[in-house]
Amino acid sequence: MNALFVAVRAIHFASAILLFGELVFVLCVAKPVWRVADNAIPDRSDVSRWPVRVAVWSLMASIVSGVAWLAIEAAAMSGMPLSQAVNRTTVGVVLGQTLFCRVWILRAVVGIVLGALLTAIMVTRDDRRRSRLTIGAAVLAGAYLAALAWAGHAAAAPPAERSLHLTSDAMHLLAAGAWLGALPGLAYLLGRAEQMPGAVSANPADLARRFSTLGMLAVGALVASGLGNAWYLVGDVPALVGTDYGRILLAKLALFAVMIALALVNRLRLTPSLHARNRAALHALRRNAVLEAAAGMLVVVLVGVLGITVPAAHQAPVWPFARTLSWKPVYESVGISTALVFAASLALVAAAMVLRGFRARRSALWISGLVAICLAVSVSGWLLAVPAHPTSYLVSPLRFTTSSIVGGSARYARECSACHGSQGRGDGPAVAALALKPANLVEHASQHRAGDLFWVIAHGVPGTSMPAFAPQLTDAEIWELIVFLRAQAEAADARTLTQRVEPWRPIVAPDFTFEIDAQPQESLREQRGRFVTLLVFYALPNSLPRLRALAAEARRFAETGVRVIAVQLAISLPSTTGESVDDGKSILAITRPDVATAYAMFARRGVEPGNEALTHIEFLIDRQGYLRARWIALPETGNNRDLEMFAQIELLNHEPPGEPAAESHGH
C-alpha cells in the first residue's frame, strides 16, 4: 500500500506542477519571445499550443491520480482493504467529515473549470482572447497546485503555526511549479529553435535568458520557503542526519543542488554562446534542460515519500557518526580557543580573496581563497569534535516534574548509590573495592547531553567498573534516573541561592499539579508567563503565623502579579485542628507528597542531605519558571520578610521577558 501511495502522490504532484508550469512558461517566457520575433517563426500556432496540450494531459493525469489518492485515503481512514473501502458509504463519510476531502472537493471544482478554460484555449483563433484565457487558466492552476499544501504535514501543524506553515508550503509548491513545470516547454522549444530563420537567430538566447530569470526567482522562493518548512519539520542538524525523514530530505537537497549546477552552466556558459549561433551550445542547453526535468521528477518522487514519512522534528534522531561538534573544548582549553580565533581570521581573509578573485576574474585567487576556507573549516571542525553516541541527541520523553525526580531518586538509591554515593559525587561505600573511582554524576549531568547519559547508563563504559543497566532497566526507568541526576545538578547550583534576586541562572523549578480552595486542578507550569510565584513549604503548627501573614497580603500579592502557593512539608509536625489560615480565599494547596520531597533537594545549604531540619522554606520563581531566591526557616522576630520579598518581586517585574524554562535536560 505504501509503494502504491507514494506512486500516486508522485504522479499527482508531478501532473499539478507540470500543469501550472507550462502555463507560466507560455505567459512569462514563450509569449514575450514570440512577440519580439513577430510572425517569423514557422508553425507558430503549433508551437504556441504545445505547452497547452501538455497542460491538458497533465490535468487528466492529475484527476485520475487524485481519484486514486482519495480511494487510498478512504481505505486508510476506514481501516478496510482498498477493494472494500471504495464504496458509496465509506467514500461519502470521508468526503463529508474530513478537511482533506473538503479541500479535494474544492480542487475538483477548480479542475473542472480549468478543463473548460484549456479547451477554450485550444479551439480559439483569437490571440488576445487566448492570452486572457491563458492568464485565467494559470491563476486557477496555481490555486489547484497551492491547495496541495492542505494534503501535507502543514495541515496537521498546531493552530498557532498552521497559517504560516501552510503559506510556506503553498509558496514552495508554486515556486517548484514555475521552475520544474516549465522545463519541458523550454526543452521542446529549444528543439524547434533550429527551424527559426536567421533574422531571429537570437531568439533561443532570449528564450533561455527569460527562463533563467524565471528560474532564479523560483529558486529564491524555493530556498526561502524550504528553510521555513525545515524549521517546522526538521528543526536541527541531528534530526536532519539522524532520521529517515531527514535523510530523504538530504537526497532531495542533493538533487536540487544538481539542478542548480545545471542551471548555472546554462546561464553563465551556454546562453551567451547562443548569440554566436553555436549549435553545440544549443544542443547542450536542451540536454541540460532535459536533465534538469529528470532530476526534478526524482525530487517529486521523494516528495511523495516524504508525505508518508513522520517529520524529523517528531522522531528521535539516531546520530550516525562517532563524533560530533561541541563548544565544550573551547571552555576547557585556551589553546583550542586561540586556534579557533586564528582559523576564523583565516576564513575571513580567504573570503576577501574569493570576492576579489571573482571581481578581477582571477581564477587562481578565488580558488586559493576557497581552499583556505575549506582548510579553516576543517581545522575548526577537528578542534570542536567530541565523542558521540547514537543516542547523543535524544531528548528525554519525561518532563522535569517532582514525580519523575522522586521516582528517579528511589531507583538511584537502589542501583547507583553504592558506587556513586547518595549525592552522586563518586563517594559511595563500594568505592574502596573499585580500581577506578566512579564519576561525579553531578558534574556529568550538567556537562553532558541527556542522550549521552542515557547511552552510558544503558551500555556502560568499557574498561571501567560502570556496568550496562540495559535491559534490566527499561528506557523509561533510565530516563527517570537522568531526570533525578539533572535535579541533583540543579540542586547543587541552588545551594548558592540567597534571599536576593541575583543574575539569572538555569535552575528550573520542577513542575507539579495542585488544587487550591476546591478550584480545578492546576500546574506550576501554567503559571509561567502569567505570574511570579511564591512557593511556600510549611509545617504546622509552627508555620501558622507566617501563613496568616501571607494570606493577609493576598491583595497586595495579586496587585504585583504574584501567585502564592503553600504546600505542606512531608515532615510536618502534628497540625492544630480547627485553625484556619485566612477568612476566605485560601493559599493552601493540595498536592502529592513527592512535591515537598523533591523541593527539599533545592533547600539544602550543605553537601550532605539531612544536615538540618527543614520546617519552612519559601522559593521565589520568576515568570519563566526559574528559581531566583529562597528563604529557609521562619522569619525571626522583628524581621520584615515581606518588605524584602516585595523588593525582590519588583526586580523580577522589571526584568525583560525571557525564554521559558526547558522541559527536558539539554545544553
Image (cartoon, rainbow, N blue to C red):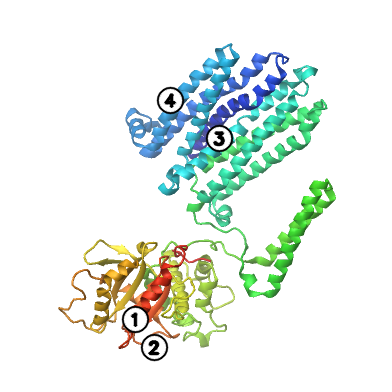
| Point 42% across, 29% down: residue | 106
Mark 3: which secondary structure?
A: helix
Mark 3 or mark 4, earlier in chain: 4
Residue 617 visible:
no
In the depicted view, which residue is nearer to us: 115 or 431? Answer: 115
Q: Name which residue type carries label 1.
A: Arg
Q: Work out how far the residue at label 2 is from the one at label 3, CA to CA, in angstroms.
A: 68 Å
User: Which residue is tagged 3?
Assistant: 174
Question: Where 415 sits versus 368, above or below?
Answer: below
Q: Name which residue type carries label 4.
A: Val
Q: Residues within 10 Å of mark 4 (few under 14, many from 20)?
A: few
| Point 45% across, 29% down: residue | 107
Whether the residues at callouts 3 and 4 have beta carbons within 8 Å, the answer is: no
Mark 4 or mark 2, earlier in chain: 4
Choose top left, top right, bottom left or bottom right for residue 609: bottom left
Q: Which numbered mark, 3 or 1, is in the foreground of this view?
A: 1
Q: Work out how far the residue at label 2 is from the one at label 1, CA to CA, in angstroms.
A: 24 Å
Mark 3 or mark 1, earlier in chain: 3
Q: Which mark is residue 611?
A: 2
Instruction: Classify residue 333 as left or right of residue 421.
Output: right
Whether the residues at callouts 2 and 3 have beta carbons within 8 Å, the answer is: no
Furthest residue toward top: 125
Whether the residues at callouts 1 and 4 have beta carbons within 8 Å, the answer is: no
Q: Name which residue type carries label 2.
A: Asn
| Point 70% across, 63% down: residue | 380
Q: Which mark is residue 641?
A: 1
Instruction: Classify residue 323 as left or right of residue 636.
Output: right
In the depicted view, which residue is nearer to us: 163 or 500? Answer: 500
